[in-house]
Amino acid sequence: MHGLIQAYSRTNRILNSVKTFGNIVCFRNLQKRTDEAISLFGDKEAGGIVVLRPFKDYFYGYTDNLGKDHQGYIDMVGELFERFSLDKPMSASEKEQKQFISLFGAVLRMRNLLSSFDEFAELDTLKEIDLQDYLSRYQDLREEWKEKRKKGQAEDINDDIVFEIELLKQIDINIDYILLLVAKYHDSHCEDKEVLIKIQKAVDASAELRSKKALIETFIAGINDVEDVMLEWQNFVKEQKENEINEIIAEQNLKPEETKKFIDNSFRDGVLKTTGTDIDKILPPTPLFAKNNNRSVLKKRVIEKLLAFFEKYFGLVSSNND
């Protein structure tokens, strides 16, 4: 039984909250032994947690052994279409916004679970174009409520509002897809407005690309006479990145060499560290009789600017500036 649990564990490697489920094909009927092993090493009632139920239960809904009803994916999506139709603008009501966030979050979690089943792609009732529109609304609300947190306008946000950040990253649209659309727009002599709308929808639906939206729009506005879209994008990003970091250095009076090294290391490591001594090394020297809080204010401002810069260019540039 110990060997069976180990075999499952080693075969089905999961990854934090994104890859929470996987498929294992058994060529023998191991249901009884699996239930016994889970009961021995865990909980007698844990079988339905460790081993997924059949696809139809999650897709159409089911009633568990305790008589509790569980809503299926198809009903969740039906409720989403009915209560929050894309034909109507998102309500300004805080209560309705919370209901949408909760329902769409449940849809995202169920999609993540159902992606383990081969049948899902063919039967999914939430088409890609509608998914992108709902993702865009979800991202808009995420940013709106993030600002409310900062301004302290909603006291109970942290208690009952949860955005599925990891799941958003999982279904994120990458820059390569956007550039393919940009190339298609360029090939139409910049006249195919439907492609432009598709680009806008894709960017608005993406958590990662939203911070790059202004950059993408500026690039698209200047591609009329471009021969190679991909090459021009690389040169454009490199130039914009260099100009912006130089502006931040001059504006905040940072140490140029140390700052660029700090940024390059951040791109290399995939994270901009806001704690430790590295961030202090790039700050200008503090006057002898300056108040301590002045430096803390400066440090906070510099971190905010560098984080925005990092989010804008991360994934678009290499760590060695080439």
Image (cartoon, grey):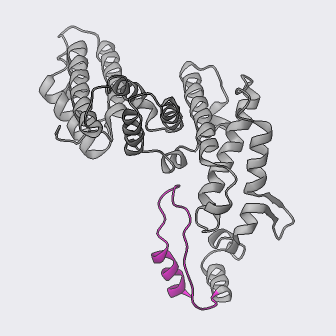
Q: Position of residue 275 (x, y in %)?
A: 32, 35
Q: Which residues are magenta?
A: 1-30
The residue depicted at 23 percent of the width and 42 percent of the height is 318
Q: Nearer the viewer, residue 234 or 296?
A: 234
Q: Position of residue 299 (x, y in %)?
A: 31, 21
Quarter of the figure with the C terminus = top left
Q: Is residue 16 above or below residue 21?
A: above
The residue depicted at 56 percent of the width and 34 percent of the height is 139
Direction top: furthest residue: 289
- Residue 104 visible (yes or no): yes
Quarter of the image where one finds residue 26: bottom right
Q: Does 177 sit left or right of 100 as displayed? A: left
Q: Tell me, yes or no, whether the highlighted magenta stretch contains residue 18.
A: yes
The residue depicted at 18 percent of the width and 30 percent of the height is 260
- Residue 279 visible (yes or no): no
Q: Position of residue 68 (x, y in %)?
A: 84, 61
